[in-house]
Image (cartoon, helix red, strand yellow):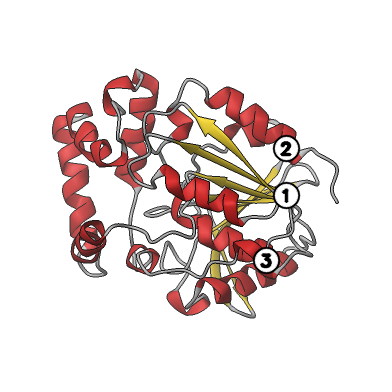
């Protein structure tokens, strides 16, 4: 997956790296998950094909967005609000929070309801403790700033040497089912390219910190998409999000793991999300 071109805008909250693909008037603001940055697009194709403009900022510590641009999840939502104002975006059809980007998406909807019409959460971290203690300690060690570059260099070397077998080792912790075994050739190729392009920067160790639970303050309609076999973000997070968000609906993916975009039912899920996005605004 070759990174796409990005820009950096200095906002009132600090510099933000972002990718803004302008198409129609309706804008989706996408907050990607851990090890991702603005230049890496995942699962965006159906929405781009439907004519949505895509605004994808890098979260603090990822890509070229420095930590000072959002030292807390809530502070970063103010920076994103400032970025939208600078770009002339007064309203977004939805904020889409993916995986570790989920808490920021919830906070953005809660803190800036004038900006956000709807909320979509995909394989998203919810208000439960995350991750487990073992994963947290391992993440601090392996993906710490100053170490993560060597970690990802080693991962890329392993992927080049062992290909799909190495990919299976990386995916196994992200599935409680037979995730790696069920991948098609195209999806395996997509994930090989994705893992080869990932970096953690200073962002991932920040994702390991607890985030505030602002679900009850979200008045907008919300759609939560998750798989019961997700080993990266357990399905209980989706259930907690639906329980905490006042106007949420849960849609189950049949994905055999964390990456719902690689499941046979992804086209149907994308169509369901598209229908949700086109519902009349409140």
- Discs 3, 2 touching: Cβ within 8 Å: no
- In this view, 154 is above or below 177: below
Pointer 1: what residue?
A: 221
Q: 99 or 199, which lies in front?
A: 99
Q: Which residue is mark 2?
A: 276
The percent position of residue 176, horizontal first and vertical second, equals 30, 35
Q: Residue 217, which numbered label? A: 3
| Residue 51 in view | no
Q: Position of residue 67 (x, y in %)?
A: 44, 75
Could you give the CA–CA distance between mark 1 and mark 3, rounded to whole angstroms?
A: 12 Å
User: In terms of depth relative to the viewer, which is nearer, 217 or 281?
Assistant: 217
Q: Residues within 10 Å of mark 1 (few under 14, many from 20)?
A: many
Residue 62 relative to residue 240: left or right: left
Q: Residue at x 61, y 69 (%)?
A: 77
Q: Are marks 1 and 2 in contact (CB under 8 Å)?
A: yes
Where is residue 102? Give x, y as percent. Answer: 52, 55
Q: Is disc 1 in contact with disc 3, using a CB cutoff of under 8 Å?
A: no
For numbered disc 3, what is the local secondary structure? helix
């Amino acid at each position: 997956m070759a990174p796409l071109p990005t820009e950096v805008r200095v906002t009132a909250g600090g510099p933000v790296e972002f990718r803004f693909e302008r198409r129609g008037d309706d804008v989706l603001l996408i907050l990607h998950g851990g090890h991702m940055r603005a230049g890496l697009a995942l699962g965006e194709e159906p929405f781009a094909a439907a004519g949505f403009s895509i605004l994808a900022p890098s979260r603090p510590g990822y890509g070229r967005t420095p930590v000072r641009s959002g030292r807390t999840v809530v502070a970063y939502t103010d920076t994103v609000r400032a970025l939208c104002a600078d770009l002339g975006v007064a309203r977004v059809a939805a904020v889409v929070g993916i995986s570790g980007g989920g808490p920021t998406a919830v906070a953005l909807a809660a803190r800036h309801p004038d900006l956000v019409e709807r909320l979509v959460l995909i394989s998203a971290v919810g208000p439960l403790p995350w991750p487990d203690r073992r994963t947290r300690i391992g993440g601090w060690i392996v993906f710490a700033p100053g170490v993560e570059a060597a970690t990802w260099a080693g991962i890329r070397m392993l992927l080049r040497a062992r290909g799909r077998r190495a990919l299976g080792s990386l995916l196994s912790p992200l599935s409680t089912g037979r995730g790696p075994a069920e991948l098609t050739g195209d999806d395996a190729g997509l994930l090989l390219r994705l893992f080869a392009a990932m970096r953690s920067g200073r962002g991932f160790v920040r994702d390991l910190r607890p985030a505030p639970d602002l679900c009850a303050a979200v008045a907008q309609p919300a759609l939560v998409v998750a798989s019961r076999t997700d080993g990266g973000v357990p399905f209980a997070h989706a259930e907690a999000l639906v329980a905490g968000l006042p106007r949420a609906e849960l849609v189950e993916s049949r994905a055999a793991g964390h990456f719902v975009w690689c499941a046979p039912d992804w086209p149907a899920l994308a169509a369901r999300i598209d229908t949700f996005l086109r519902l009349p605004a409140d």
